[in-house]
Each structure stands twice: as structure tokens, then as C-alpha cells.
């Protein structure tokens, strides 16, 4: 019996080409397994082989989504694979979006596809109803366990075998209920969970509830005419040329920009780095996203005390919740050090 043919997709980092400085590279195809593909090769044994690996930089993929998916799809089809694997991406936001995007396109073409990522990766929520996504740890230290779960499910998909429930196969729940028989009846499982909880030990619920942050609202500003107001945005407004190279999707950083003496954000001096909306109007007048012009007028009229010297900007498009929390904590600390009274948060 001949081995199943597999095509594998990875980014520039896992191909050992480079980090962020090489995220701009266009897609290329190489023969055989590379990087994580070697782990898949060992896991597949004699059942399947990776015949080709497709590599693409995360920035290039997310900034050229329409064209790059077509290019990579053609590369995949040339190999006539039985299975397409992307990643795993763990908690890397742009990589996760890339893996999900290309796996969805390949799946639609009739080639079984699978990827893997951490549950909080933005790609997981975006694509879990379109493709099978194995739940992984949040970083590459979980590569072995990710491959161990991805390979068997991938082989099942390639052979068109019946796929079990998410708890059996290890994929992120996709909204489709699959019946299966548990070894223990419900009452026994419930008592075991209760005993674990009462003992302060870890337990796994069979009905996880969503968790939401609860942020207590601050007291209102007592006198807005004396307040120092700062602007923070997820709309991606940056100085012309995007000096900090903030990504258009799944941002890994934020920028802090000096607007001392700036009364108007012109098309010659500011633009948006955001890849999730039509940038035309924001690029013509960035004040449409962060109202520096209006706040300067308010400052002049005495309606606010002062506009803070710096504004902070990132891109919310596909950015991981964990990254957003980190940005928020760092920005808040900096704002407090500048005695800022209130913040205007703008999006898109």
C-alpha cells in the first residue's frame, strides 16, 4: 500500500529562515519535510510522507491575503496530496490566521486540511467552524504533543474515516455535536469532578462556561476643563511609513508617538497600518480615527485641560486577547506616570 501524500505549510520562523526581519518573504515550495515536518514524518511512520513544504512570511501572507492564497493553493495542487497540514501555530496570531486562512481555502478545493493552535489564538475563533483545529499549548514547547494529536486526525481525514467528538480527537469544538459512549456514567463522572474540586485539585468540566473580564468603571472626571486627556487606538494610526512596523493583522506590538505641536494629522504625515478595513479615508485624514484636530480645538477653547503629548496605537485586527491585555497594561502604566486624567479609546 502506497503512502499518503502530505503537503505541509509553515512560516519563516519554523523554516529557520529568520524571525520578524524575514516575515516579508513570499511563498516558496521545497521538497520533503522541514522543521516541524520532521516530527510529523516520525509520527506518520510508513503511513504517510510529506512530499513538499510551503513556506511564507507571516507579514507577506497577511498583507497579500487574496493573491497569496491563490498562489499557495496552486503549489499545493501541483503535488496532488491526500492531506494538507498547516502549522501548528500555537499562540502566534499572524501565523494562526495564515494557517487557518490557507487551510480553509485548500479544504474548499477538496483536499482534507488540518491545523493546530492555542485556543486563544485569533485564528482559532476565526476558523474553528471551517476546518479541524487541534488544540495545542501556547508555545512551541508543545510541539511534540501537538504533532501527536494532529497526525492521527489528519490520517483519518485523508482516509475519509469517521471523525469522533472533539474530546476524543483533540480538536477545538466546532459547534457540531458528535455522540459517543463514555466509559463511566454521568453520575460517577460528576461525583469525581466534585471530589476533585472540594480537594482543591484540578478537574476538567464537560460543560465549560465562557469567561469574561469584568472591569470596574472608574469614577467620572471631576473637572474635564483641567484634565489631561490621552488618545489610545486600535485603529492602527501611525506616522507615515509605519516606523515601528506594526503588523496589519495580529499585531505583536504597539507604538507611542509624539504629537507635541501637532494640530492636524495630514495625509502627508500619518496613515493607518490596519489591514482589517478600507484604509482610504483614514489615510486621507487620520483625524477620522483619532480626533487630534478636535481635541486641539477643545484645548484652545478651555473645554479640556490638555491633550497628552503622546498617543498610543496598535492594530486590533486578529490580535490575540493575551497580546491586547499586555499592551493595555503597559500603556496604562505609562499613562499613569504622565498623570493622565482620562483616555479616549478609538477603534475603527
Image (spheres, helix red, strand yellow):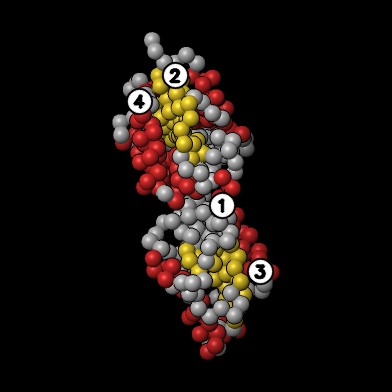
Residue placed at 35% from the left, 39% from the top?
105
The residue where tag 3 is placed is 336
Contact? badges 3 and 2 (CB < 8 Å)? no
The local secondary structure at tag 4 comes to: loop
Q: Position of residue 45 (x, y in %)?
A: 50, 16
> Quick check: can you spot residue 151?
no
Give the mark nearest the N terminus, 3 or 1: 1
The residue where tag 2 is placed is 48
Q: Nearer the viewer, residue 171 or 82?
A: 82
Q: Position of residue 178 (x, y in %)?
A: 35, 30
Distance of label 3 from label 4 (alpha carbons): 58 Å
The local secondary structure at tag 2 comes to: strand
Give the quadrant of the N terminus. top left
**Position of residue 59 in the picture relative to residue 276 (left or right):** right
The residue where tag 4 is placed is 80
Give the mark nearest the N terminus, 3 or 4: 4
Distance of label 4 from label 1 (alpha carbons): 35 Å
The residue where tag 1 is placed is 252
The local secondary structure at tag 3 comes to: helix
Residue placed at 55% from the left, 24% from the top?
38
Residue placed at 35% from the left, 35% from the top?
74
Give the quadrant of the C terminus. bottom left
Distance of label 3 from label 1 (alpha carbons): 23 Å
Q: Identify whether 265 is placed above or below 122.
A: below
Check disc 2: other Cα within 10 Å, few if <14, some if 14-19, many if 20+.
many
Distance of label 4 from label 2 (alpha carbons): 13 Å
Q: Identify whether 31 is placed above or below 210.
A: above
Looking at the image, which residue sits at the far top?
A: 1
Give the mark nearest the N terminus, 4 or 1: 4
Q: Identify whether 239 is placed above or below 126.
A: below
Say which of marks 4 and 2 sits in front. 4
Amino acid at each position: 500500500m502506497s503512502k499518503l501524500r502530505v503537503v505541509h505549510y509553515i512560516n519563516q520562523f519554523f523554516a529557520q529562515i529568520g524571525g520578524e526581519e524575514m516575515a516579508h518573504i513570499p511563498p516558496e515550495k521545497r521538497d520533503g519535510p522541514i522543521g516541524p515536518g520532521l516530527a510529523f514524518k516520525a509520527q506518520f511512520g510508513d503511513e504517510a510522507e510529506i512530499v513538499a513544504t510551503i513556506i511564507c512570511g507571516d507579514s507577506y501572507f497577511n498583507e497579500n491575503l487574496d493573491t497569496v492564497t491563490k498562489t499557495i493553493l496552486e503549489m499545493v495542487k501541483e503535488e496532488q496530496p491526500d492531506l494538507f497540514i498547516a502549522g501548528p501555530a500555537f499562540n502566534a496570531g499572524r501565523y494562526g490566521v495564515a494557517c487557518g486562512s490557507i487551510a480553509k481555502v485548500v479544504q474548499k478545493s477538496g483536499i482534507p486540511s488540518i491545523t493546530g493552535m492555542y485556543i486563544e489564538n485569533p485564528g482559532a475563533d476565526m476558523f474553528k467552524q471551517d476546518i479541524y483545529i487541534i488544540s495545542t499549548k501556547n508555545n512551541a514547547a508543545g510541539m511534540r504533543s501537538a504533532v501527536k494529536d494532529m497526525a492521527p486526525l489528519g490520517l483519518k481525514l485523508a482516509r475519509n474515516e469517521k471523525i469522533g467528538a472533539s474530546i476524543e480527537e483533540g480538536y477545538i469544538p466546532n459547534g457540531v455535536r458528535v455522540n459517543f459512549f463514555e466509559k463511566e456514567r454521568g453520575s460517577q463522572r460528576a461525583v469525581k469532578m466534585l471530589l476533585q474540586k472540594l480537594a482543591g485539585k484540578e478537574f476538567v468540566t464537560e460543560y465549560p462556561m465562557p469567561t469574561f473580564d469584568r472591569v470596574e468603571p472608574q469614577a467620572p472626571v471631576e473637572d474635564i476643563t483641567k484634565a489631561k486627556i490621552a488618545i489610545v487606538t486600535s485603529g492602527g494610526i501611525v506616522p507615515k511609513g509605519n516606523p515601528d512596523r506594526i503588523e496589519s493583522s495580529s499585531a505583536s506590538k504597539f507604538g507611542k508617538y509624539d504629537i507635541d505641536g501637532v494640530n492636524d494629522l495630514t495625509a502627508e504625515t500619518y496613515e493607518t497600518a490596519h489591514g482589517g478595513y478600507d484604509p482610504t479615508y483614514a489615510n486621507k485624514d487620520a483625524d477620522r480615527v483619532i480626533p487630534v484636530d478636535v481635541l486641539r480645538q477643545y484645548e484652545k477653547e478651555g473645554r479640556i485641560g490638555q491633550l497628552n503629548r503622546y498617543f498610543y496605537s496598535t492594530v486590533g485586527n486578529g490580535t490575540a486577547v493575551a497580546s491586547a491585555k499586555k499592551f493595555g497594561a503597559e500603556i496604562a502604566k505609562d499613562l499613569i506616570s504622565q498623570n493622565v486624567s482620562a483616555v479616549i479609546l478609538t477603534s475603527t
